[in-house]
Image (cartoon, coloured by chain):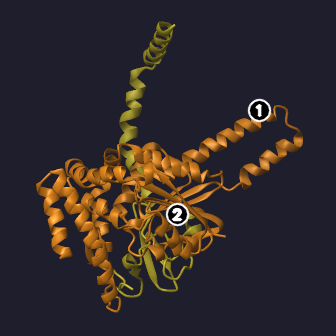
Chain colours: A yellow, B orange
Amino acid sequence: MFKNVLSRLVTQTVRPHRYAPPGPVIQRLIPASGPLRSFTDRKDEAQPQFDASLLDVLVCPLSKKPLRYDAETNELINEELGIAYPILDGIPNMIPQEARLIQKDSTEMPTQ
Amino acid sequence: MAASMRLLVRRAVRLSHRNITLTAAGAAARSGCCRGPSVCRCFSDEAEDRSTHFGFETVSETEKAKRVYKVFENVAQKYDIMNDAMSLGIHRVWKDALLHVMHPQPGAQLLDVAGGTGDIAFRFLEYIRLQEERQKRRAARSSQTPSWQDISNNYSTEDESRESRAVVCDINKEMLKVGKQKADSLGVSAGLSWVVGDAEELPFDDDQFDIYTIAFGIRNVTHIDQALQEALRVLKPGGRFMCLEFSKVNNPILSSIYDAYSFQMIPVIGEVIAGDWKSYQYLVESIRKFPNQEEFKGMIEDAGFYCVKYYNLTGGVVALHSGFKL
């Protein structure tokens, strides 16, 4: 019985290999993998798809008020306090010390 | 005197692998250090920079936060491998036990603080997925010929029922990066979010989450009581706080084996696998500095949680504390 199962497994894996023509597969792989993956990767990092649902729960850790997502600078902005939290690799950084003051040019807020 | 004892322990651990000197020095250092930092704290309470413990050392609070950050930045890449090596895979059992006690239902919102590489969040989503499949199978079996009313109900609940979601929050970007990579390689993305945040100052609104977990992270927080208060704040009424942490082993035989293993084997494994002796030395020392089961239960109750209880796992090596916000 075991031999039957084994032989069935082997023939089943071999069959698709025989039928799938190698030509179009290779043609599909080469142009598709390179630029397409980098394109989607770049899009995913900048894309706010995760942000939309996160914005429901995320607030400024200091004032506990909701934030505004700014797509150009890829930051979460608290208008009231005038600070912006950066988003790196799609992960928002909500540490107050790493937030940027919007009005001034300084990059770090003074520690509390 | 305490300082010289600590130095002695360090030197003994690094140079010799002899059992006798090590356990004796370790025991002496521990008893000396327990008195030391508490005295320092009394004197420096008025000062700007309070002091706390970093393993067996006494450091300022800002210093501790920085050093803990550095520790996890260094170990992030090898964190999961080290966990398996140090605990001989038993950490998986502990985390599975956490999920089993949690028993989350579909639609639950989880906040995993100090979640780092996402172990709890992944298990949570998997558990809920299995629950949903089981429920669907049960529903399919019982309703072989649904009435028109059942069919219309099914259509409406599919959109309205809340999707379960897991938010992983950690103060360390490197740990989250590793976790995100794991998620991408496992193909898990739906209902999973990653946020860099401080457990003492969570970037979440009040009454948001059904379950708050912190697994093997709370001993690294500088102000544990603040973290507990934040946990109470972000939980919904009826929400559950769950904490997995290394704790006190009561059995003396198991305790001596555990101490010997911790102080002799773990930093060595850390050096061999992760190339970082000091971080793992900090790890085992920080376990000894953390309050025991009853003390921690008291801290959780002080923060305002009700029905606080704890479960000892592996003879007390790990304790699972649970409390409710009512």
Q: Quadrant of the C terminus of chain A?
A: bottom left
What residue is drawn where x is 52% and y is 63%? A51
Q: Which mark is residue B141?
A: 1
Q: Locate residue A71, reporting x and y percent.
A: 48, 68
Task: Give the residue pinned by disc 2.
Answer: A51
Residue B88, position as x, y percentages in the image: 35, 43
Question: Within 10 angstroms of label 1, few (less than 14), some, or many (20 or more) residues?
Answer: few
Is residue A85 visible in the rendered image? The answer is: yes
Q: Chain of mark 1?
A: B
Q: Is residue B68 left or right of residue B94?
A: left
Q: Position of residue B154 (x, y in %)?
A: 78, 45
> Horizontal placement of B130 versus B54: left or right?
right
Q: In terms of secondary structure, where does tag 1 sit?
A: helix
Report the side of A76 relative to B89 (left or right): right
- How far is disc 2 from disc 1 in space, using C-alphas? 39 Å
As displayed, is residue B4 above or below residue B169? Answer: below
